[in-house]
């Protein structure tokens, strides 16, 4: 099978998808924005051919590159696994007559109001939401559901650009920030109190072949706005043992069906609270923050290889062991500036060394990144344990003990 892969260089784990395709015997061509010289030795070895463009999200450039490749060798699949690349790849795929994620599915997985309209009609419980492009429309929605509400871009990923609005003063600032006052269409939705997590799948021919459930502590919006918090997320090894996950799994499988997802990774966010289980949003691609690395450690498997098997053979080859719970904790610098040092790392190493998967501690002098940049923007540590609750306790201790000093 000949697979064209979009952008093999960035982010860093992109090359794992290429590696997996090579391991299952695919012929791989890549289209990317860097030069051929920027490819490392492994990528050069795995790739049969590489086409450079200036922008992989430009449908015209992507289609021109694909047609050139098709002129040399038949193309069976063109695959993208980064949120920003999904729609361009879908449009090019359809223009070239190549099977895979459709533009309809890609659009529904990106446009939040349209996504939720389809899901509500199909019986999936979601927060009340709509698309708005004026202050009058926002105010009418708030009159119906009350404060607080969330305003966010229609195509934003995760908490990117999302703002919690609790008052008329908040609303005016949020509308200016998102461009509603200039007529930009955005999503507004009811704020749901409750615990937040995500449900990730690898689906093959419209059926979920692998599934994983992960929990945020605290919820993402708070985590991405509050410096003193060392946020974490933990993937459970109890998804097949605890009946409470049955509802999450049933919801996720229904979403896959309703949105027309065929052979693809997915990343779905959900809330659970006083109003029950509520679907939040979906990406038709793997989760970010290298969550698949945690799934691999916890389940004694190679999910990148399973993705390649799904693409190339239409079947899985491994079963998750559910042996370990795994998690990551983000360690925030004390302020913006440059990292000056760390405290508490040695103590954590002595107590929990056997449970540490890996860690990232930028050298002193490294510029800090803003809190909103995400879980892996600065320092972080990843851990494992066969007991989910024990792992959560250990990550809490890490957050209380380790300090990343900056000036």
Image (cartoon, rainbow, N blue to C red):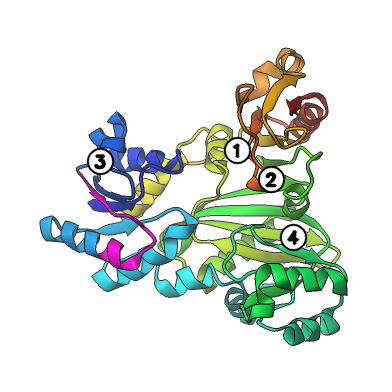
Which residue carries the number 4 mark?
271
Please tell me which of labels 3 and 1 falls first in the chain. 3
Query: Where does residue 251 sit, x and y in percent of width and height?
Result: 64, 65
Q: Is residue 57 magenta?
A: yes
| Residue range (magenta) | 49-63
Q: Secondary structure under badge 1?
A: loop
Please tell me which of labels 3 and 4 falls first in the chain. 3
User: What residue appears at the point 74 percent right and 41 percent down from the top-left corner?
Assistant: 231
* Observer able to see residue 353: yes
Q: How many marks?
A: 4
Q: CA distance from mark 2 to mark 3?
A: 48 Å
Q: Tag on residue 241?
A: 2
Left or right: where does residue 294 sit relative to residue 70? right
Left or right: where does residue 124 sit relative to residue 63? right
Which residue carries the number 1 mark?
322
Please tell me which of labels 1 and 4 falls first in the chain. 4
Query: Where does residue 138 sit, x and y in percent of width and height?
Result: 75, 81
Judge by depth and name the residue closer to the eye, 189 or 240: 189
User: What residue appears at the point 76 percent right and 37 percent down from the top-left corner?
Assistant: 230
Mark closer to the observer (2, 1): 1
Q: Residue 305's image quarter? A: top left
Other residues around mark 4 within 10 Å, as few (<14) / some (14–19) / many (≥20): many
């Amino acid at each position: 099978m000949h697979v064209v892969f979009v952008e093999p260089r960035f982010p860093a784990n992109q090359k794992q998808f290429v590696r997996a395709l090579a391991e299952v015997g695919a012929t791989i061509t890549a289209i990317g924005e860097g030069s051929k010289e920027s490819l490392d030795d492994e990528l050069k070895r795995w790739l049969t051919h590489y086409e450079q463009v200036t922008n992989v999200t430009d449908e015209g450039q992507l289609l021109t590159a694909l047609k050139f490749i098709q002129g040399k060798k038949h193309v069976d699949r063109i695959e993208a696994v980064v949120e920003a690349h999904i729609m361009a790849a879908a449009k090019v795929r359809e223009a070239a007559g190549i099977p895979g994620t459709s533009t309809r599915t890609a659009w529904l997985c990106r446009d939040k109001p349209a996504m939720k309209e389809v899901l509500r009609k199909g019986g999936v419980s979601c927060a009340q939401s709509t698309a708005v492009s004026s202050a009058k429309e926002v105010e009418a929605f708030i009159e119906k559901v009350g404060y607080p509400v969330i305003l966010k871009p229609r195509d934003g990923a995760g908490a990117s650009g999302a703002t919690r609005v609790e008052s008329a003063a908040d609303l005016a600032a949020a509308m200016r920030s998102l461009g509603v006052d200039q007529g930009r269409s955005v999503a507004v939705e009811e704020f749901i109190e409750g615990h937040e997590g995500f449900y990730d799948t690898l689906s093959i021919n419209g059926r979920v072949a692998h599934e994983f459930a992960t929990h945020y502590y605290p919820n993402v919006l708070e985590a991405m706005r509050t410096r003193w918090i060392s946020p974490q997320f933990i993937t459970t090894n109890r998804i097949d043992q605890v009946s409470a996950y049955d509802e999450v799994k049933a919801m996720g499988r229904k979403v896959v069906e309703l949105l027309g997802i065929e052979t693809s990774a997915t990343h779905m966010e959900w809330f659970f609270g006083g109003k029950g289980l509520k679907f939040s949003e979906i990406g038709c691609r793997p989760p970010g923050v290298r969550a698949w690395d945690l799934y691999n450690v916890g389940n004694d498997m190679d999910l990148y290889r399973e993705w390649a098997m799904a693409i190339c053979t239409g079947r899985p080859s491994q079963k998750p062991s559910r042996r370990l719970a795994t998690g990551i904790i983000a360690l925030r610098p004390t302020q913006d500036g440059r990292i000056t040092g760390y405290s508490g790392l040695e103590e954590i190493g002595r107590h929990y060394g056997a449970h540490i998967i890996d860690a990232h501690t930028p050298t002193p002098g490294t510029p800090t990144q803003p809190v909103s940049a995400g879980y892996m923007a600065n320092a972080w540590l990843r851990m494992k344990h066969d007991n989910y609750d024990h792992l959560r306790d250990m990550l809490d201790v890490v957050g209380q003990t380790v300090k990343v000093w900056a000036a």
